[in-house]
Structures are given as structure tokens and as C-alpha cells.
Image (cartoon, rainbow, N blue to C red):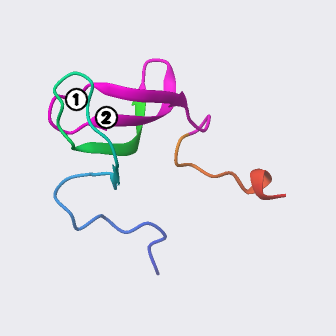
């Protein structure tokens, strides 16, 4: 019997972060990254400084984050 969702082999969970051009307004580092985050207010697509974690931008993301419903494809 095949397992639909096998146990992950990675020791930790991580999300892919896209590099973004620009500099941080707080620390002037040129280490901006874009990725989704889950907060108490729901999912957001953010651009953060990898050096000081300052939010450069934050926009509401998909209601269920990375979960894609079949009904959304129709």
C-alpha cells in the first residue's frame, strides 16, 4: 500500500525565500527577501531584511496560504 504523504526526510521545515533588490530602511543592509508568513492576522506575503528582520512590505496573502483548493481552479 502506497503512502499518500510520506514522512519528510528533512530535519526542519523551511520556506523558499526570493532575493529582492534594495536596501533596508532600518539597517541599510542589502539583504532583502520575499516569502509568505503566517501571523495572528492570517497569511501575508512579506519582504523582510534578512539582517534585522524589519518588514519592508507586508500584503495580505492567500486565505489558506500554500493550500490550494480544487474549487479555486475551476
Q: Nearer the viewer, residue 32 or 4?
A: 32
Instruction: Give the magenta range.
Output: 39-64
Q: Is residue 33 depicted above or below 23 in this figure?
A: below
Q: Which residue is mark 2?
A: 48
Q: Is the Cβ of the residue at disc 2 closer than 8 Å to that at disc 1?
A: yes
Q: Is residue 40 depicted above or below 37 in this figure?
A: above
Give x and y (percent) for residue 34.
38, 44
Q: Nearer the viewer, residue 40 or 52?
A: 52
Compared across the picture, whether 52 is left or right of 73 comes to: left
Which of the numbered marks, if any, corresponds to residue 53? 1
SS at badge 1: loop
Compared across the picture, whether 55 is left or right of 61 comes to: left
From the image, which quarter does the C terminus lie in? bottom right
Q: Residue at x 21, y 21 (%)?
A: 26
Compared across the picture, whether 50 is left or right of 63 comes to: left
Query: Is 56 one of the magenta-colored residues?
Result: yes
Q: Residue at x 52, y 48 (%)?
A: 66
Q: Residue at x 44, y 66 (%)?
A: 5
Query: Is 8 one of the magenta-colored residues?
Result: no
Amino acid at each position: 500500500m502506497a503512502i499518500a504523504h510520506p514522512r519528510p526526510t528533512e530535519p526542519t521545515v523551511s520556506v523558499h525565500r526570493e532575493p529582492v533588490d534594495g536596501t533596508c530602511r532600518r539597517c541599510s543592509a542589502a539583504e532583502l527577501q520575499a516569502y509568505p508568513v503566517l501571523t495572528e492576522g492570517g497569511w501575508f506575503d512579506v519582504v523582510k531584511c534578512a539582517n534585522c528582520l524589519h518588514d519592508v512590505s507586508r500584503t495580505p496573502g492567500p486565505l489558506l496560504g500554500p493550500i490550494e483548493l480544487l474549487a479555486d481552479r475551476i
